């Protein structure tokens, strides 16, 4: 990997500049106002693949935003790595909470990134991490040290549920043939404590609507006489957890795989400070399901959270009114073997059952996704572990994450492929939040680590024969 490393070292400034250029395009997939920018970003990703030396590059149209495909096949007898990532980003709002404009990247040091971090929407999730793979490919191709065949599939709809990627995968099984899927869209414990993600939670996402009277009413004339949809919605939401912070939906936990005490003890060995955790988000205490640690609550246990709630008057001053309708968006994070469709069903049934006869409720399902766990004894995991040990000087710790990448379960189902989640972000990088950032250290550490993954994966695969 000597030539590859030299190539990376001598091209660092350019690699950084190119990422900043990519971050300047606001590829917000959720908002149609940005459709043109999403496409421009796809074109830029395709161009960067071309510059990296990839072949058969195609901007693949879907019913939504395009998927960028590219490959470098050097030898049919070598294993093939399929890289997945996303070039779309979350909306930037609330924009007023950003210290610098979300699509005008700046580099500033932070507590966890004394060497500087790139502040921009998508810096960590996932443009910065996805682009590490393009740059690593460029370094390997131009140095003649690419050790595996490479295929790239970079989508533009991850942040809105990846529905069209599912279709694309089903229709392109031949083209996507590979031996392993490699993804950098997760994190590590700390820059001094590398880790590899071995599990993701699933997701069921619903929107609820509670309707009371057929119009907004004067709260003096009608107050106390009719159901106020906002009051009722608040009561209903409060009923979704019990006093032990368990979710009350009947059947919700039926398929949850309980983790053995041995495995929990093993998990508890990963370095973690509850004090630092609380301090990092300004909390005096944590909150969650009785009988589980914070780490467990956020990885091996499911969760239900209201993501947004609205209704009634929220303008200046006071308006005495009983709203006709109240709404909430609710996410449920799932663990193996919970099924998102089944959970959405259970939620709907329960939510309807607890509604008083004075209101009507509607539950609208949004996108979902299945949970996933990845093995720690596969060639893919071992290659990632060796690669990180090489560049960090420390063996990475396997750790389950609480986030979701719904497509991972589908990769296994449709392509029969395992995924390696070798991400380089930090929890403190504020993904989906104002002031999202990505460490310059992490960006280059990723670019340096990926070539070793290819090298070790090729070696481990060869040993099998
Ligand atoms: N990259 C994240 C998921 C993630 C982040 C996993 C950090 C583990 C560690 C991904 O882009 C994401 O935000 N996923 C969504 C789900 C999607 C269906 C909107 C999520 O987890 O909310
Ligand atoms: Mn992501
Ligand atoms: Mn995301």
Image: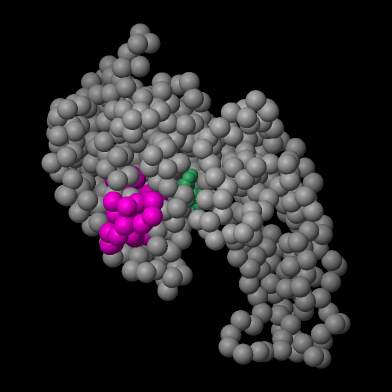
Q: Nearer the viewer, residue 342 or 306?
A: 306
Count of number-bearing discs: 0
- Please name the residue shown 40% across and 28% down the image: 395
- Please name the residue shown 44% across and 35% down the image: 195
- Please name the residue shown 65% across and 42% down the image: 293
Residue 91, position as x, y percentages in the image:
43, 63
Which image quarter: residue 77?
top left
Report whether 81 appears left or right of 262. Answer: left
Residue 322 in sight: yes
Report whether 263 appears left or right of 65. Answer: right
Compared with 455, 284 (above or below) is below
Residue 344 highlighted magenta (yes or no): no
- Please name the residue shown 32% across and 13% down the image: 462
Residue 301, position as x, y percentages in the image:
65, 41
Residue 459, position as x, y percentages in the image:
31, 17
Report whether 139 appears left or right of 361. Answer: left
- Region in magenta: 105-131
Residue 318, position as x, y percentages in the image:
66, 89
Residue 113 highlighted magenta (yes or no): yes
């Amino acid at each position: 990997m000597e030539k590859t490393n030299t190539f990376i070292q001598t091209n660092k400034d350019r690699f950084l500049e190119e990422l900043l250029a990519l971050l300047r395009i606001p590829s917000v997939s959720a908002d149609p106002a940005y459709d043109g920018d999403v496409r421009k970003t796809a074109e830029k990703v395709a161009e960067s693949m071309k510059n990296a030396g990839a072949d058969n590059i195609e901007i693949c149209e879907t019913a939504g935003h395009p998927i960028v495909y590219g490959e470098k096949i050097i030898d049919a007898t070598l294993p093939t790595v399929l890289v997945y990532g996303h070039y779309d980003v979350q909306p930037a709002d609330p924009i007023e909470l950003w210290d610098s404009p979300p699509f005008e990247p700046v580099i500033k040091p932070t507590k966890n990134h004394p060497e500087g971090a790139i502040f921009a929407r998508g810096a960590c999730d996932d443009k910065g991490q996805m682009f590490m793979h393009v740059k690593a490919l460029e370094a390997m191709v131009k140095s003649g040290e690419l050790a595996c065949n490479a295929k790239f599939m970079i989508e533009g709809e991850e942040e809105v549920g990846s529905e069209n990627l599912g279709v694309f995968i089903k229709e392109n099984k031949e083209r996507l043939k590979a031996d392993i899927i490699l993804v950098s869209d997760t994190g590590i414990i700390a820059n001094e404590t590398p880790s590899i993600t071995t599990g993701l939670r699933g997701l069921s996402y619903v929107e609820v609507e509670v309707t009371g009277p057929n119009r907004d009413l004067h709260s003096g004339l009608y107050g106390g006489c009719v159901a106020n949809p906002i009051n009722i919605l608040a009561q209903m939401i409060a009923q979704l957890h019990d006093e032990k912070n368990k979710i009350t939906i009947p059947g919700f936990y039926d398929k949850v795989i309980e983790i053995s005490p041995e495995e929990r003890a093993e998990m508890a060995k990963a370095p973690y400070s509850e004090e630092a955790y609380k301090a990092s988000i300004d909390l005096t205490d944590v909150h969650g399901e009785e009988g589980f640690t914070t780490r467990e609550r956020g990885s091996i246990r499911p969760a239900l959270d209201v993501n947004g709630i609205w209704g009634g008057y929220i303008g200046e001053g006071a308006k005495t009114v009983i709203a006709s309708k109240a709404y909430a968006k609710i996410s449920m994070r799932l663990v193996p073997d919970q099924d998102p469709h089944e959970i959405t069903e259970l939620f709907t049934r329960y939510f309807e059952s607890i509604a008083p006869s004075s209101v009507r409720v509607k539950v609208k399902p949004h996108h979902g996704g299945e949970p996933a766990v990845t093995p720690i004894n596969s060639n893919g995991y071992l290659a990632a572990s060796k690669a990180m040990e090489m560049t960090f000087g420390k063996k990475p710790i396997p750790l389950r994450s609480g986030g979701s990448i719904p497509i991972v379960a589908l990769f296994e189902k449709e392509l029969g492929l395992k995924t390696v989640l070798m991400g380089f972000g930090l929890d403190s990088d504020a993904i989906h939040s104002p002031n999202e950032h990505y460490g310059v250290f992490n960006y280059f550490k990723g670019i340096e680590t990926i070539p070793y993954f290819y090298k070790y994966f090729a070696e481990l695969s060869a040993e099998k024969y």
